[in-house]
Image: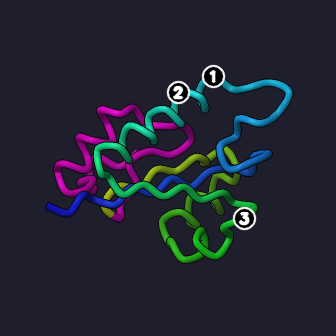
């Protein structure tokens, strides 16, 4: 069975994980652990950063609408199965897996 694609659109950070500055954000540490767990479970997970993946941001209409309306406050944005699951903060493992196992996010469940 093919797993639902999970895409994370993130704000500019010092590196691809955000765990490389003089202070480490514990939320990013926990989210990196969550990403590793999802990948280990064979989920397709892609992370995109605004500063390095601008083309990917622009190719996602829903993401660009949020960025235009909310600017950096709308990031991070998590998409599951091509639909926005959460914006402005990172989702939990349960939220991601629940949406992925349902085949995506229903329109009435968005953000």
Q: Which residue is outermost to the right? A: 22
The label shown at residue 26 is 1
Question: Image check: 111 left or right of 73?
Answer: left
Contact flag, marks 3 and 1 (Cβ < 8 Å)? no
**Neighbourhood count class around disc 2 (C-alpha, 10 Å): few under 14, some 14–19, many 20 upward:** few
At mark 2, the secondary structure is helix
Disc with the residue nearer the chain's start (3 vs 2):
2
At mark 3, the secondary structure is loop
Report the quarter where the C terminus lies.
top left
| Vertical side of 101 occupied by 69: above or below | below
**Neighbourhood count class around disc 1 (C-alpha, 10 Å): few under 14, some 14–19, many 20 upward:** few
Report the quarter where the N terminus lies.
bottom left
Disc with the residue nearer the chain's start (3 vs 1):
1
Q: Whole-percent x and y of residue 29?
A: 59, 28
At mark 1, the secondary structure is helix
- Nearest the viewer among 88 and 96 is 96
Judging by the rendered image, the residue that carries numbered circle 3 is: 52
Question: Image check: 96 left or right of 56?
Answer: left
Q: Residue at x 65, y 63 (%)?
A: 68
Label 3 vs label 2: CA separation?
22 Å
The label shown at residue 30 is 2
Q: Quadrant of residue 9?
A: bottom right
**What is the magenta range?**
82-111
Q: Which residue is outermost to the front? A: 40
| Vertical side of 84 occupied by 40: above or below | above
Label 3 vs label 1: CA separation?
23 Å
Q: Whole-percent x and y of residue 89?
A: 54, 37
Q: Is residue 105 magenta?
A: yes
Q: Quadrant of residue 66?
A: bottom right
Q: Residue at x 51, y 53 (%)?
A: 8
Contact flag, marks 2 and 1 (Cβ < 8 Å)? yes
């Amino acid at each position: 069975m093919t797993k639902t694609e999970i895409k994370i659109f993130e704000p500019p950070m010092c590196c691809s994980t955000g765990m490389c500055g003089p202070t480490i954000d514990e939320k990013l540490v926990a989210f990196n652990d969550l990403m590793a767990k999802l990948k280990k479970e064979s989920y397709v997970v892609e992370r995109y950063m605004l500063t390095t993946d601008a083309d990917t941001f622009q190719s996602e209409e829903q993401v660009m609408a949020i960025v235009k309306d909310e600017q950096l406050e709308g990031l991070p944005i998590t998409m599951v199965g091509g639909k926005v699951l959460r914006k402005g903060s990172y989702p939990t493992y349960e939220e991601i897996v629940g949406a992925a196992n349902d085949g995506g996010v229903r329109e009435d469940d968005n953000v």
